[in-house]
Image (cartoon, rainbow, N blue to C red):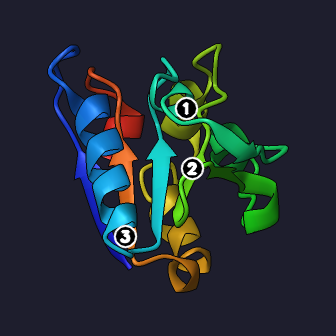
Amino acid sequence: MQVVSIISTKGGVGKTTTAANLGGFAADAGLRVLLLDLDVQPTLSSYFTLAERAPAGIYEMLAYNEQRAEQLVSHTAIERLDLVLSNDDRGELNTLLLHAPDGRLRLRHLLPTLAPRYDLLLIDTQGARSVLLEM
């Protein structure tokens, strides 16, 4: 699985739009794509109509080390395009990961469980310097 992070410390520069468009194009080209919405403002999570919404999202993945795809991965109406929703509406993940011993490495340790299912992972980040961005 290739992992691509769309990063800028400035907001409003098109990170989410880039992630959504790249994801849609790659899925249309036949790749199995997972979008990961790490932004506190869950714009990427609202770009695509969901065919099936997972009960959990990025909060459970990072706060509780949830690794089960059936709990985390929502399926969009676009074939081969899936999404892990941003559901950290109170912005608690930054503080939690800042104080966790593995905070900046946690995502790296969780991704291998998803790797066999996808060809491409696109990560949309928030437009501010934070632990989530560093991770």
Residue depicted at 64% across the width and 16% down the height: 89
Q: Is residue 120 left or right of residue 68?
A: left
Q: Which residue bears the numbered disc 1? A: 45
| Residue type for callout 2 | Leu
Residue depicted at 14% across the width and 21% down the height: 13
- Residue 115, given in percent of the width and then of the height, sits at 51, 79
**Where 13 sits versus 118, above or below?**
above
Q: Which residue bears the numbered disc 2? A: 83
| Residue type for callout 1 | Ser
| Residue type for callout 3 | Leu
Q: CA distance from mark 3 to mark 1?
A: 17 Å
Disc 2 element: strand
Q: How many residues crowd mark 2 within 10 Å: few (<14), some (14–19), many (20+)? A: many
Residue 4 falls in which quadrant of the image? bottom left
Q: Earlier in the sequence, mark 2 or mark 3?
A: 2
Q: Which residue bears the numbered disc 3? A: 120
Q: Is residue 102 left or right of residue 60?
A: left
Residue 15 falls in which quadrant of the image? top left
Q: Earlier in the sequence, mark 2 or mark 1?
A: 1
Q: How many residues crowd mark 1 within 10 Å: few (<14), some (14–19), many (20+)? A: many
Q: Are marks 2 and 1 in contact (CB under 8 Å)?
A: yes
Number of numbered discs on residues: 3
Q: CA distance from mark 2 to mark 3?
A: 12 Å
Q: In this orientation, which residue lies closer to the viewer: 96 or 23?
A: 23
Q: In this orientation, which residue lies closer to the viewer: 66 or 31?
A: 31
Q: Earlier in the sequence, mark 3 or mark 1?
A: 1
Residue depicted at 40% across the width and 64% down the height: 27
Q: In this orientation, which residue lies closer to the viewer: 63 or 26?
A: 26
Disc 1 element: helix
